[in-house]
Image (cartoon, helix red, strand yellow):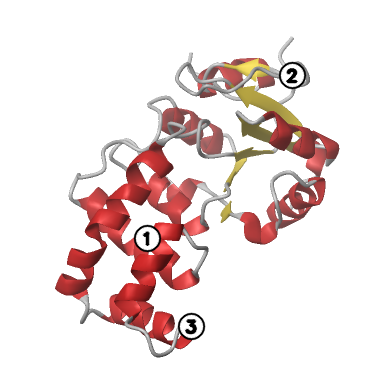
């Protein structure tokens, strides 16, 4: 007999909803290569000007373009850099230069779950803005309206149970009614310690090590079949 469905699904990004190396192997190198030309072409636009001004305030006396390039090389968690990366990625997605960011089974599954009234949220070590960009360009459509929120490590580290407790509060759902999807065993352990249901998503190209402590599924439709979520007929 299928399990009762969760009230909310919280999903990791890399290796779960998107290919594991998409962020590190596609998005970040693309932003780094585009940064000089993007600043030169769009430096007078309000959004870009705001990024440059913020960089100047944080590192006074240095060319903000050099500051941003340095942050980019070191992948610094600097808010102006994150904002600029978001702008560059949006432009890249809009021009079709970045390809398909999510697995093909993700969009139809998320639509089906949201239609059934299940709350959806994403949680990643990467910025909330990056997450929005990924789901705004999934399967040629914008899926962001399906989500109740995009959360990053500002709510806490993914290895800490308290982070998942705070996320359940943000979603207004008891932890025991939240299903967390990830490929990473340590994150699933933390979610389970907080009282959440868990499922390890083991993509064929993900390279994750199978856990003995959590249910496993090969993709989102398999998650639905195992955990009582709406699935295709």
The residue sitting at the left extreme is 41
Residue beneath label 2, please? Answer: 3
- Residue 128 placement, left or right of 85: right
Q: Which sits in the foreground, 120 or 198? A: 198
Q: Residue at x 22, y 66 (%)?
A: 36
Q: Which sits in the foreground, 136 or 15? A: 15
Q: Residue at x 60, y 28 (%)?
A: 183
Q: Which sits in the foreground, 205 or 172? A: 205
Residue 44 figure quarter: bottom left
Instruction: Using the image, determine if residue 71 lies above or below residue 134.
Output: below
Residue beneath label 1, please? Answer: 86
The residue sitting at the bottom extreme is 61
- Residue 52 placement, left or right of 45: right
Look at the numbered disc 2 and give the secondary structure of its residue: loop
- Residue 161 placement, left or right of 90: right
Look at the numbered disc 3 and give the secondary structure of its residue: helix
Instruction: Using the image, determine if residue 198 lies above or below residue 148.
Output: above
Residue 69: image location, x then y, percent: 34, 67
Q: CA distance from mark 3 to mark 1?
A: 19 Å
The tag earlier along the polypeptide, 2 or 3, is 2
Question: Which labelled disc corresponds to residue 58?
Answer: 3
Which class describes the residues within 10 Å of circle 1: few (<14), some (14-19), or many (20+)? Answer: many
Q: Residue at x 32, y 42 (%)?
A: 141
Look at the numbered disc 1 and give the secondary structure of its residue: helix
The tag earlier along the polypeptide, 1 or 2, is 2
Q: CA distance from mark 1 to mark 2?
A: 39 Å
Q: Which of label 1 and label 2 is nearer to you?
A: 1
Q: Residue at x 47, y 16 (%)?
A: 204
Q: Which of label 3 and label 1 is nearer to you?
A: 3
């Amino acid at each position: 007999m299928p399990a009762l469905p969760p009230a909310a699904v919280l999903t990791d990004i890399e290796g779960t909803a998107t290919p594991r190396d998409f962020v590190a192997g596609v998005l970040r190198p693309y932003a780094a290569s585009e940064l000089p030309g993007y600043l030169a072409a769009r430096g007078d636009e309000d959004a870009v000007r705001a990024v440059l001004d913020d960089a100047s305030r944080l590192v006074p006396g240095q060319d903000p373009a050099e500051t941003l390039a340095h942050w980019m090389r070191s992948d610094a968690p600097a808010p102006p850099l994150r904002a600029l990366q978001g702008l560059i990625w949006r432009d890249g997605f809009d021009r079709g230069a970045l390809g398909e960011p999510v697995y093909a089974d993700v969009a139809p599954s998320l639509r089906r779950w949201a239609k059934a009234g299940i709350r959806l949220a994403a949680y990643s070590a990467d910025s909330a803005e990056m997450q929005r960009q990924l789901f705004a360009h999934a399967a040629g459509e914008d899926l962001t309206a399906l989500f109740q929120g995009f959360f990053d490590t500002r709510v806490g580290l993914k290895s800490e149970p308290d982070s998942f407790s705070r996320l359940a509060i943000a979603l207004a759902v008891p932890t025991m009614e939240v299903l967390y999807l990830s490929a990473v065993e340590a994150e699933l352990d933390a979610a389970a310690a907080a009282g959440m249901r868990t499922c390890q998503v083991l993509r064929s190209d993900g390279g994750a090590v199978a856990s003995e402590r959590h249910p496993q599924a090969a993709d989102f439709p398999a998650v639905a079949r195992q955990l009582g979520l709406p699935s295709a007929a």
